[in-house]
Image (cartoon, grey):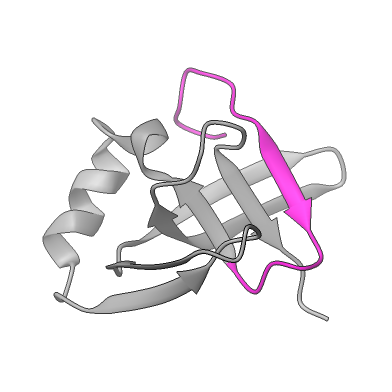
Amino acid sequence: MKGFGNSWSMLIDSGASGKYHRRCSLKGSQKYAEALKAQKNETVTVRFATGALVTVPTVPVNLGVEFPDFDSIERCLVLDLGERYDLILGIAS
């Protein structure tokens, strides 16, 4: 990911309804700090693949995503995801 020193694990998921980023991977970053300042005290409820529903503060972050044949700025919702993936990119059907 552009602007971050560590490599991240990513899942491209045709079943996901949006784009999500793991909160702990962003902590300490300028992008996350700016997103927290701009936060409007709104919440969103998300259903994980396990079926669990979680309600979290809405903290969107624009991230540069680049890999072969793909270079884009993606707006991601920051969540407390499990440790398996840092970034989940949903594909619109």
User: Residue 41: horizontal and vertical position, in percent?
Assistant: 14, 75
Q: Is residue 21 covered in magenta?
A: no
| Image position of 88 with respect to 25: above or below | below
Looking at the rendering, the stretch of residues picked out in magenta corresponds to 1-18
* Residue at position x 63%, y 51% in the image: 88
User: Residue 32: horizontal and vertical position, in percent?
Assistant: 28, 46
- Camera-side residue of 78 and 52: 52
- Camera-side residue of 51 and 37: 51
**Viewed as shown, does residue 60 lie left or right of 36?**
right
Q: Is residue 3 covered in magenta?
A: yes
* Residue at position x 12%, y 59% in the image: 37
- Determine which quarter of the picture holds residue 36: bottom left
* Residue at position x 39%, y 55% in the image: 78
**Viewed as shown, does residue 52 lie left or right of 84?**
left
Magenta segment, principal secondary structure? loop
The outermost residue toward the front is: 51
